[in-house]
Amino acid sequence: MSGRYIVQKIAQAIVTIIAIVLLNFLLFRMMPGSPERILLRNPYLTQEKVEQVRADWGLDKPLFPDQFVGYVKATAAGDLGYSLQFRGQSVVDVIESHFWPTMLLLIPAEVIAIIVGLTAGSYAGWRRGSGGDKVASGTSLILYSMPYFVIGMPLIIIFAAGLGWFPTSGMTTPGLSSASFLTQLFDFLRHLVLPLAAISLGLIGGYSIIMRSAIIETRSEDYVTTARAKGLKDRRVLRQHAFPNAMLPMVTIIAIQLGYVVAGAITAEVVFNWPGLGTLTVDALETRDYPVLQGVFLLLSVTVVVANLGADLIYGRLDPRVRS
Amino acid sequence: MTGSADFVPTGRSLRAERWRLRVRGAREFAGQFASRRDGLIGLAILSAFTLMALSPDLFVGAKETVVSATGTRLEPPSAAHILGADELGRDILNLTVHGARISMSIGLMATAITIVVGTSIGVAAGFLGSWTDSGLMRVTDFFLVLPTFVLAIVLAPVILDIIGPEAEFLGLRATLLVIVVVIGITSWATTARIIRSQTLSIRERMFVDRARVIGSGSGHIMRRHIFPNVVNLIVAQAVITFAAAVFIETSLAFIGLGDPFAPSWGQLLESAQSAGAPGLGAWWYIAPPATCVVLVVLSFTLVGNALDDILNPKAQVRR
């Protein structure tokens, strides 16, 4: 891969991140009134006190360049301000404590969805038009039309409220903190099953649809015809000739998708009351906790940019034609 | 497509000739669409929902409110309430049918914004080229990368604060208006990309040169020569955008950005969640609005894919 290609892609990503920081800065200063109005929801404050707070926070200085430079410096140093909802906690701490629950949910969901989605998609594409394809494609399309929470709600009704196999919400049962490690682990896994199923099913729909069309495209390629003409078994043609080539575009799509999955899973977390970033975002929205909203937006959009950069670099490595 | 190769002198007037080609095109299109079973199924479902959205009173009477509610709290389905009642005793069937108008009009308006912005930017970037193109495409790429749903969550309270919660436009209250605007702002980029690439190829066609030679300005060429040739794509794109708009609206309403006084399907699901319906096993509260969302999104996707295959010149090459 040429150095120029890499440098160009990295430069683009940096410009995009700067634009995101600028947008984040401007968005929350477009609101009528001023930040201290939101922070000091207290009608009994004297004018001097307000002036003093404005001076302390640097709000008496102009937006450009003083306030913006200050914001960029603080952001670069990892200071995202303080949460309004969780008094006294920094935004970074709040986000960090909600980050791992989300990862515990999303990493296995991605793994399951990639395995099942790609298998179902390549089978459907390889046997295009067959009964199996119709069932797989129809199911994928229906799953793809459902927001995660719409998949989650019937799961709760059937498997939690109805059959009672799994708890309806949360990540742990309160009051188990003194129980043995195994009991706690089992309790966590029981809570994990339904949200994991909801997110995996949602992702499987998308992956399988894309994989199906990728396989259909490779199916008419000359090397597949050659492989068939050599007398290879059908299954082997799919596994060793069509599948690896169809994976080429899939790798980038999956890499890009990884950046969006946290954002997509927000509604799933809400429906299962899972204490992750999604629930945090919605709580911040309800309480108008702007610093946290800003922090989540920054984190998630930078993740997407980095995922995109990763996809570009991987693709450049896998496909020599892109480099020129 | 009305390319010059189709034109054979027939002695008819130019207007009659143009009309003849148009009718022939429409007939050809109808024939192609009729052979797509998925598109037809989608169209049938959509017609039913459109009817529901246009005249909900016809099916279930006036929208029930807290005052006119006839059921009891989370009442299971019975003869009087086929789909049971919500936490305020309102009939679920009634609410779901009335939700069609709200969900679908938000989808329609958000689609309109998306298509108008996306098409204008796409045609301008593709046709004007040079720095206009690179500038507009940088902005488009930026919006393409941003996680739409999170941006919508962040934008909605900010816009709500700016226009004030009392604002009203075309009978729409501020909260719903904000959802429309937010979906529009966050989803035009894909359309702009698609329209731009089509404009780039149309720009090189002979009739554009001819128009320029006889002295047409850029604005005129874009409106009279480029635009009519991307309309096909716009139609297909609009249908696909509609599916996405209903999908996003449902999610935004579910996390609390909807209007409880004008409940869309997403808002109904939010109320169900707040009332604890999933944990109580109150399936009758959840199944009707959820089914409607899935059916509408699914059928728009089916129709959109069929239209895209028929109308998108690139898809025709693929086949």
Image (cartoon, rainbow, N blue to C red):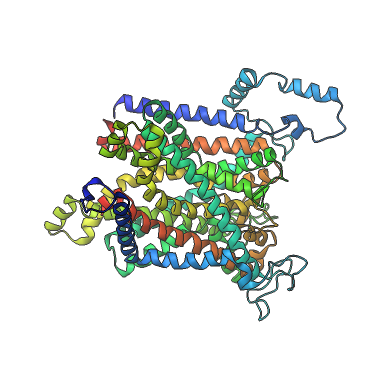
The answer to which quarter of the image holds residue B56 is bottom right
Image location of residue B145, percent across then percent down = 46, 38
Q: Which residue is drawn at 41% across and 42% down?
A: A255
Residue B175: tell me if it is visible: yes
The answer to which quarter of the image holds residue B34 is bottom left
Residue A50 left/right relative to B282: right
Reply above or below: A64 against B194.
above
Q: Which residue is drawn at 43% across and 56% down?
A: A204
Image location of residue B76, percent across then percent down = 67, 75
Residue, far left: A230
- How many tags in the picture? 0
Q: Residue at x 62, y 35 (%)?
A: A294
Reply above or below: B253 against B94.
above
Image location of residue B299, percent across then percent down = 45, 62
Image location of residue B263, percent across then percent down = 65, 59
Residue, far bottom: B79
Classify the position of the C terminus of chain B by image quarter: bottom left
Q: Nearer the viewer, residue A123 or B53?
A: B53
Residue A35 left/right relative to A180: right
Q: Which of A107 and A3 is in front in this view?
A: A3
Residue A146 left/right relative to A216: right
Reply above or below: B175 against A61.
below
Residue A180: tell me if it is visible: no
The answer to which quarter of the image holds residue B193 is top left
